Image (cartoon, helix red, strand yellow):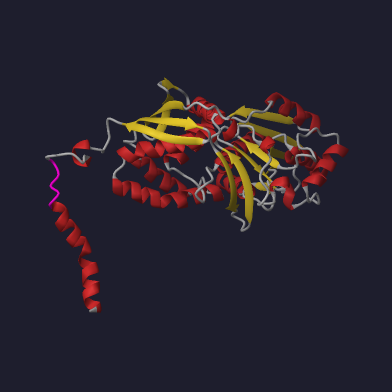
Amino acid sequence: MSDQIKKVVLAYSGGLDTSVILKWLIETYHCEVVTFSANIGQDEDLDQIRENAFNTGASKAYVEDLSETFVKDYVFPAFRANAIYEGQYLLGTSMARPLIAKRQMEIAKIEAADAVSHGATGKGNDQVRFELTYFAMDPHIRIIAPWREWRLTSRTALMEFASQHGIKVPTTPSKPYSSDANLLHISYEGGILEDPWAAPPDDIFTMSVSPKDAPDTHEFLEITFDQGNPVAVNGQALSPAALLRELNRLGGRNGIGRADIVENRFVGMKSRGVYETPGGTILRAAHMAMESITLDREVMHLRDSLIPKYAEMVYYGFWFSPEMRLLQNLIDDTQKNVCGEVRLELYKGNCRVLGRKSDRSLYSIDFATFEDDSVYRQKDAEGFIRLNALRLRIQNMLKG
């Protein structure tokens, strides 16, 4: 069996890294390169990306719309879990990578390709997310990770390579940071953002206005949930992608969802990232409000104890692991009664819950009221407290 690589399927965004990689693969391996570009809601000219792929040497260019699949099968499951990494990151890039890698592997099978390739660096998390998915799909797949092989050690070097080869790329020396966009968020890393003391420039943001420039009037909305999933906004039923797109629009114009984070990468270093997640920020707040009246206390507390582990698995790239399937099944079982409506207020970067209602609510005004009631015997609390205090009393008596 020959070790020669004849065909590679490249995850191709059309940005600086993958544009250079496309040409580099052809020159280095003398092979045919098929590109795969996924539309997962990013605001890009996909026809231009296809044209750029052919102009740079691709033999075939797949461009597919996976936005509905992304939201339905990746974003919504994670939001049913209220997943958030290190208390701030809503995992927009982390959820997109396994989807892209899975479809890339399916195309590699269709094309009878010898290998797959990606543009993730040897320092980041994405290399792990891509390659764990590759191996989950095919344990024998050959992987080419140029950032771990070539001598182009900086984005400045990549821009010089692109210029020398006449490759059109969007990154310029004046804006040398890296960005990644999808329907859930956009991230910004590197370049001028590598100093954690420096504030991000106002002109980098694209999904949201600055809170200080948001309207001076409050905006109200209602989100309807069915088994933990949002299904309508202001009474209008929407598909998963259309619903998230509408929440992005509402949140973006009200300055909601910006985050500036120093996070712990899987490979061991700390990294600064700036994110915009307007619709996701609204959705998480609404989902937690919906759960507050429909989830049993102990079920909620047990599920909440698993959120850090769930988020860590997504962040680290274990989307297709057996432990992830197990945990997702458990979480989805908690969501059967998470149904109803949540009312929210958006105002200058803030998302505030105003109300929640459900025909499966566990909240009972008869028990919770501070007024007269006939269902709760306050005298019962005395024995409850004394029994819970018993071990504390014994400890104190032993000290005496």
User: Which residue appears farthest toward the top when viewing the image?
Assistant: 236
User: Which residue appears farthest toward the front when viewing the image?
Assistant: 216
Image coords of residue 229 (percent x, y): 41, 33
Q: How many marks?
A: 0
Question: Which residue is depicted at the point 31% across and 38% down?
Answer: 293
Left or right of 356, for residue 347: right
Q: Quadrant of residue 223?
A: top left
User: Which residue appears farthest toward the right when viewing the image?
Assistant: 164
Image coords of residue 253 (percent x, y): 56, 28
Range shown magenta: 375-379
Left or right of 57, for residue 122: left
- In the rendered image, the quadrant that contains the C terminus is bottom left
Image coords of residue 306 (percent x, y): 41, 51
Q: Judge by depth and name the residue closer to the eye, 306 or 373.
A: 373
In this orientation, does residue 31 appear?
Answer: no
Magenta segment main secondary structure: loop
